[in-house]
Image (cartoon, rainbow, N blue to C red):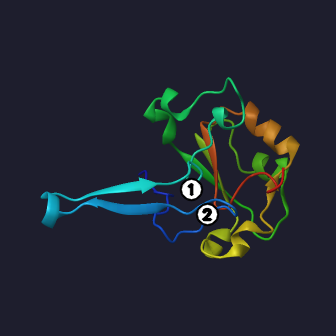
Amino acid sequence: MSEIIDLSHQINAHMPVYPGTNPPTIKEICTLKHDGFKESLITFYSHTGTHLDVPSHIFAQGKSVHEYDCNKFYGKAILIHCLNIKTIEISMITSEYDLTDPADYIVFYTGLDKFWSNNKYYEDFPVLTNEAAGYIASLPVKGLAIDAISFDPVHD
């Protein structure tokens, strides 16, 4: 039996954001008392909280999120534990990924989710080696997920 696991964080005005990025703003525009209905204006950067990086994020001719069918964004996943390490090596992936029963997603668990609302979340997270990234690119996966700020060093 399959289980659907929602990996997203709730967006709110006090959530952690990447250093230098403004936090979300949520402004009540219409009220029940004055307008007969409630409506809010919500403003935030596309990299706020749980988000999706698509090719257009770094490639001029890359696809944007609206160019993908929504079926792209769910499927069978495997979990790779990456606790207390500096780099995610290709051997960690090859030992877990079953080529005879391929997963749609590879999810890397670093344990840094426990620091979601503090600055430690942005420090000392494991990053993919170039070899590991190249290997993943050769697999029939729909995507990757990580509970850290990035797969790359912050200043890369």
Residue occupying image coordinates x 78% and y 69%:
123
- The crowd level at tag 1 (other Cα within 10 Å; few <14, some 14-19, many 20+) is some
Image coordinates for residue 38, horizontal then vertical, percent: 22, 59
Name the mark on residue 17: 2
Looking at the picture, tell me which residue is in the foreground, 9 or 140.
Answer: 9
Image coordinates for residue 45, horizontal then vertical, percent: 56, 51
The secondary structure type at the circle numbered 1 is: loop
Q: Amino acid at mark 2?
A: Val
Looking at the picture, tell me which residue is in the foreground, 46 or 146.
Answer: 46
Residue occupying image coordinates x 74% and y 34%:
137
Residue under numbered circle 1: 48
Identify whether 94 is placed above or below 138.
below
Q: Which of marks 1 and 2 precedes in the sequence?
A: 2
Horizontal side of 15 relative to 99 (left or right) equals left
Q: Estimate the spatial distance between the alpha carbons at disc 2 and disc 1, rounded to whole Å.
A: 6 Å
Name the mark on residue 24: none
Looking at the picture, tell me which residue is in the foreground, 18 or 67.
Answer: 18
Give the farthest residue toward the top. Answer: 61
Q: Quadrant of residue 140?
A: top right
Horizontal side of 80 relative to 123 (left or right) equals left
Give the farthest residue toward the front. Answer: 34
Image coordinates for residue 73, horizontal then vertical, percent: 50, 40
Looking at the picture, tell me which residue is in the foreground, 120 or 135.
Answer: 120
- The crowd level at tag 2 (other Cα within 10 Å; few <14, some 14-19, many 20+) is many
Q: Quadrant of residue 124?
A: bottom right
Q: Amino acid at mark 1?
A: Thr
Q: Are marks 2 and 1 in contact (CB under 8 Å)?
A: yes
Image coordinates for residue 61, horizontal then vertical, percent: 68, 23
Horizontal side of 26 relative to 149 (left or right) equals left
Identify whether 39 is placed above or below 123.
above
The secondary structure type at the circle numbered 2 is: loop
